[in-house]
Amino acid sequence: MAVVETRKLTKVFKEGELGAVNDVNLETREGEFLVFLGPSGSGKTTLLRMIAGLEIPTAGEIRIGGRVVTHLTPRERRIAMVFQSYALYPHLSVYNNISFPLKAQKVPRQLHKQKVEWASGLLGIAHLLQRKPRELSGGERQRVALARAIVREPLVFLLDEPLSNLDAKLRASAREELELFHKRVGTTTIYVTHDQVEAMAMGDRVMVLHNGFVRQLGTPREVYDTPADTFVATFLGSPPMNLLENDDFIVGFRPEHLLPVEIAPNPAISFRLKVKVTEYLGAEWILYGTVTGGKFDGKEVISRLPSAASFEADKTFQFGVREPDLHYFDRQSEKRTQPKVLTWQ
Amino acid sequence: MAIKTDPPASAKLPPDPAGVQPPRHEEGIAVTVPWHRTPENRATLLGIAMFTPAVLFIAVLIGVPFVLAFVYAFTDVKVGSIESHYVGLENFRSILQSPSFKKALVNSFIFTIISQVLVIVGATILSVALKDRFRGRGFVRFLILLPWVAPISLGAIGWKWILDSLYSVINWVLVVLHFYKPYSAPMWLGEPHLAMASVILVHTWRLLPFSTVIMLAGLTAIPKDIPEAAEVDGAGFWRTLFQITIPMMLPIIMVAVLFGIIFTFTDMTVVYVLTAGGPYDSTQVLPSLAFFTGILAGDLSQGAAISLFLVPIMVAVTYVMLRLAHKSEIA
């Protein structure tokens, strides 16, 4: 187990262009499950690859377990990585795939069998050891990749979107397994994903990246409940947060907090909502509508309601948001600010 | 519930045995479409038209001579003879007793095996070196491809001068550097072992680009993740090369070897230009012997019999190589 630190870590691929990763300062906690979350092109994979040693930083420093590793090769960093494609060696059996790091690290030969059996047993693939990767399903391949990663007991695990090649159902169960696995092994883990559900579900903390900059680092609850800026506010949550531009600030509220006044009495703001489209999703309704009357007349907003409620399109209802559920952002910097006085009319 | 609809009227008509499509009604006028104008048949005709030149080419330039060689090998036909007689296996019996043939057979194997080993090792090194980007990579790739692009006879004549007994550049350099006294430098093409080594090296020079290009293709087909995973797993350059990269390239290496063996075993250009098989048959290979016997010496039937010895060897090599390539093929 070890702490990963980065100081002012920057990667510029083409001189004169904006960096893929800019001035990232990061410090993981011991045994933590940290998630890098961001849309594609946000720099999360580049950041991970720099920590792995597969990409040379343009500037800045990386420390693993207190040791500066910025200019060390991957093999000297004692890390393990699971690639998006799993990168299993196609010509080697599962056994030889898992034992490859042991051979490469010159672990005594007599220990190989025991360690491979331990790792494969932990991931429930002990019966697949003689197969070739092409004879395995997507989920099995992922487990082989994980077994290959843990077999030499690394200081840090780096996982690059390991679930994105699985189908939706398998992904949910693999996610759960991965969480249990992390609890059991307790190794510091950095996990890259563009899927906010994965990030919220698995991360001890989530780091939201956009255009190579860190937008927010916090627990899933913090990033969801108190987003640091409008990007985080809209990137997390589906449907995204409603944002209404006022004179010098932006007010935001999540769709699940925009409720009919009968359900949420004494709202801080209240307005008539003309429902345009309704989507019935089983457990909930999504209403797309426009604000009618007042300062924000014609603005489009989204509401998410438990499916006990029932609404028809083209009708108008009284909706409101309670005070604690309102978020305020500066209009210039788009950063979170103190609550403001909102005049609705 | 499925809705039942009547099929269109034309579908009910039985197919016309004469191959003429049922009349189509366009703007009220019945039009009969000729057989070769229907879309499917047009595609078939186009396919035949595009395929025929290749078939004719192979049949006339390869098939006919091949059949003739078979026929000649069992007769006593000579260049210029008007008639020929069936002589059974006499030609084969005769060449098997000939010392020249035995020498050429052994030489063919030496020539092929040594040059292929050199080509594969060299091509692997070159392809690994040329895979990653560096300044001037395009130019280096161009230089390496040159021996393959230039006509072999030109290249071989160039080498004949480089290795010449009097004007050899190599010998000049060796003399200037005081490795040898003037006029005592090695006769590259005049001493049996040196001549064989020279022929092998020139042929290797000639084949190297081809194998390098094939292997570069194989190397670039390996996903970038895999060598990276090996790096993270702690493997250094050599371990990655020998345990990951080369095993993954094995199917494509087999293809390069297969082509290399065929090109080498059946080739006589380098031998013909550099040494003409000499000195004392020490560089004679089966194709050059067949040419000298059958064409230059005029004994067509013996020449044909010699060249037929290549066939079973090539078939066996091809079979073994394709089996190996299939076995080591990766998903």
Image (cartoon, grey):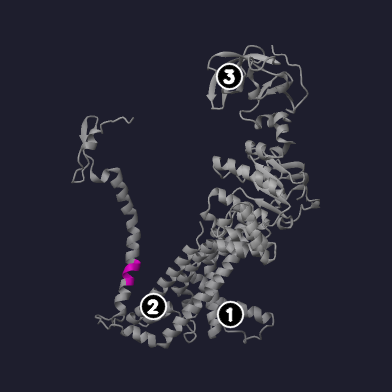
- Crowding near the residue tagged with mark 3, few <14, some 14–19, many ≥20 C-alpha atoms within 10 Å: many
**Circle 2 residue:** B309
Which part of the image, by quadrant, shows the C terminus of chain A?
top right
Assign a secondary structure to mark 1: loop
Tell me which residue sits at (71%, 58%) in the image: A75
* Residue B230, picture quadrant: bottom right
Q: Position of residue A82 (x, y in %)?
A: 64, 50
Q: Position of residue A163 (x, y in %)?
A: 60, 44
Question: Start and end of the magenta stretch?
Answer: B61-66
Question: Which label was assigned to residue B167?
Answer: 1
Badge 3 vs badge 1, beta-carbon distance below 8 Å: no
Tell me which residue sits at (65%, 80%) in the image: B174
- Crowding near the residue tagged with mark 2, few <14, some 14–19, many ≥20 C-alpha atoms within 10 Å: some
Near-viewer residue (B6 or B297):
B6
**Circle 3 residue:** A289
Q: Amino acid at mark 2?
A: Phe
Q: Amino acid at mark 3?
A: Gly
